Amino acid sequence: MSSIISLDTIKSCLSKCADSDLIQIIEDGFVSYSKGDVVVPPVGHLPFINPPGDLHIEYGFIKGDDYYVVKLASGFYNNPQIGLSASNGLMLVFNQKTGELLSILLDEGHLTDIRTALAGAVVAKHLAPAQINRIGIVGTGIQARLQLRFLKSVIDCRDVIVWGRGDEKLNDYKKDPMLAGFDISTTQNITELTNHCNYIVTTTPSKKPLLLAKEVKPGTHITAVGADTPGKQELEASLFGKASCIIADSISQCKDHGDIFHPVHQGIIKEDQIIELGTLISTGQKRKNDSDISIADLTGVAIQDIQIAKFVYQKTKA
């Protein structure tokens, strides 16, 4: 009989795990993906206009594994205005040998949020500048908070500037107990962030560039998380022309609907300039110079869902 795992049980399970262990399972997944050991069909996508939102359907399996996973995750961006989370969804874990449904993970989008933030920590582990002056976070939502929360495990810097569009959201961000230990200042002027931060994470659903090429300083690393569906864009396309290291969680996905889509289709960069994250990890490549600009484009890959869903299912089953 298949199990139903509640959000409370999922959160309790994750709270008992070391951040380093969670980061490692996502890192291992990226390596398997880039080696060709994972079957991941194209992401299913339903766009909604009024109110604005989208649904992602992601699914796949590791060859020879015991499981396959199907994930549905939605984002409805006006929900916080009516007291609801912007994220929702669930994950289904099946037996790869028989097709039996083993478990329904009623995570309400929480596991998608966590696995996305863990991917940001994986990037930081391998691409962060040797000396980080300040961390810059673009956005104030749950992903903006989780990205910073998991950076604590891989980055020593605790000095942060957060950019947002309104005082209320910025103040709420600053007071979040999850971010205790960080020295957080806020701004509505993104130039203040780019002037002072050499490690920047963008987490918004913006459809026009927020970070401009002329404003990003040499030596900056940027992890772009928000452009996970067609039409979204957080980075000016010409910024990629200044980068000496361009990373994609999935080259095929990022060319289709990530921030990388724009510079590729405008002829600013070529596909052979892009390195897949799993390849970067397995080959041990690092930033070559302190003055390099590096960019990681994270669109979200089903291997992350497979890894986090398997982990929770096995832990709760045990």
Image (cartoon, rainbow, N blue to C red):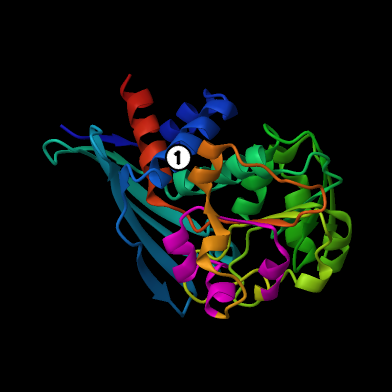
In the rendered image, which residue does mark 1 sit on?
31
**Residue 163 place in picture, x, y as percent:** 77, 61
Residue at the top extreme of this rendering: 318
Q: Quadrant of the C terminus?
A: top left
Quadrant housing residue 93: top left
Q: On the picture, is 253 further left or further right than 212? A: left
Q: Is residue 70 visible?
A: no
**Residue 176 place in picture, x, y as percent:** 72, 44
Q: 168 or 125: nearer the eye?
A: 125
Q: 302 or 316: nearer the eye?
A: 302
Confirm whether the magenta stretch covers residue 94: no
Q: Which residue is located at x 73 percent, y 51 percent? A: 173
- Circle 1 packing at 10 Å, graded few (<14), some (14-19), many (20+), is many
**Residue 268 place in picture, x, y as percent:** 62, 75
Eyeballing the image, is 232 above or below 41? below
Q: Quadrant of the N terminus?
A: top left
Eyeballing the image, is 103 above or below 203? above
Q: Is residue 82 visible?
A: yes
Magenta span: 238-265
Q: On the picture, is 147 further left or further right than 161? A: left
Q: On the picture, is 58 further left or further right than 256? A: left
Quadrant housing residue 264: bottom right
Quadrant housing residue 45: bottom left
Eyeballing the image, is 50 above or below 285? below
Eyeballing the image, is 54 above or below 23? below
Q: Which residue is located at x 14 percent, y 39 percent? A: 100
Disc 1 is placed on an element classified as helix
Q: Which residue is located at x 39 percent, y 64 percent? A: 55
Please state which amino acid type lies under the numbered disc 1: Val
**Residue 144 place in picture, x, y as percent:** 66, 53
